[in-house]
Amino acid sequence: MQRQLIGEIVNRFERRGLRIAGMKMMQLDDKILSEHYSHLVGRPFFPSLAASMKASPVVAMALSGVEAVAVVRGMTGFTNGRKADPGTIRGDYAMSNQQNIVHASDSPENAKIELARFFRPEEIFDYKHALQAYLYAPDEC
């Protein structure tokens, strides 16, 4: 929100051919951050991470497509923006390990858990992408 890059980032995902299945702006709190980053709660940097995530609303997105998790991970780049390749979201817009613009699920299994954390079932939409025939070969869908 603070960097005013939401439109640019959404545009990148759409141009790549991913389908937006859900999107909303929300304010994160300690409860959801402690759950989402449970593997980091005991680390010394967690309080500053949580503070930065609560500083303004965030935009949560559910993206779909063939191998969507891997595609999104590739598009986001390394967690540390200084090490992320140019052309990735973090490589183009981030200089920090913590202030790195986007979060991306690391596996399809974790994506399901994270989607349930941030979206109610009725907030995820399943619809046919109008350009599907131009995005994928028939045997890929």
Image (tube, helix red, strand yellow):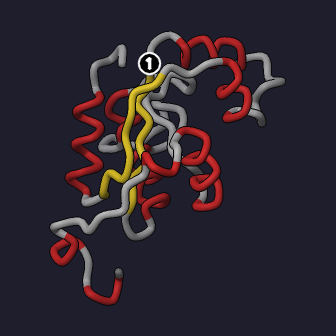
The answer to whether 82 appears left or right of 24 in the picture is right
- Above or below 55: residue 93: below
The answer to whether 90 appears left or right of 40 in the picture is left
Question: In the image, what residue type sits under mark 1?
Answer: Pro
Q: Nearer the viewer, residue 135 or 116?
A: 116
Q: What residue lies at 41% left-to-right and 59% top-to-bottom?
A: 71
Q: What residue lies at 66% left-to-right and 28% top-to-bottom?
A: 32
Q: How many callouts does the rendering have?
A: 1
Q: What residue lies at 38% left-to-right and 46% top-to-bottom?
A: 22
The furthest residue to the bottom: 139
- Above or below 16: residue 36: above
The furthest residue to the right: 42
User: Where residue 98 appears, x then y in whole percent?
Assistant: 56, 23
Q: What residue lies at 36% left-to-right and 62% top-to-bottom?
A: 126
Q: Quadrant of the C terminus?
A: bottom left
Quarter where residue 101 is shown: top left
Disc 1 element: loop
Quarter where residue 66 is shown: bottom left
Q: Residues within 10 Å of mark 1 (few under 14, many from 20)?
A: some
Q: Nearer the viewer, residue 82 or 31?
A: 31
Q: Which residue is mark 1?
A: 57
The furthest residue to the front: 122
- Above or below 133: residue 83: above
Q: Quadrant of the N terminus?
A: top left
The answer to whether 10 appears left or right of 59 in the picture is left
The answer to whether 79 appears left or right of 15 in the picture is right
User: Where residue 96 appears, x then y in whole percent?
Assistant: 50, 23
User: Where residue 64 appears, x then y in whole percent?
Assistant: 39, 60
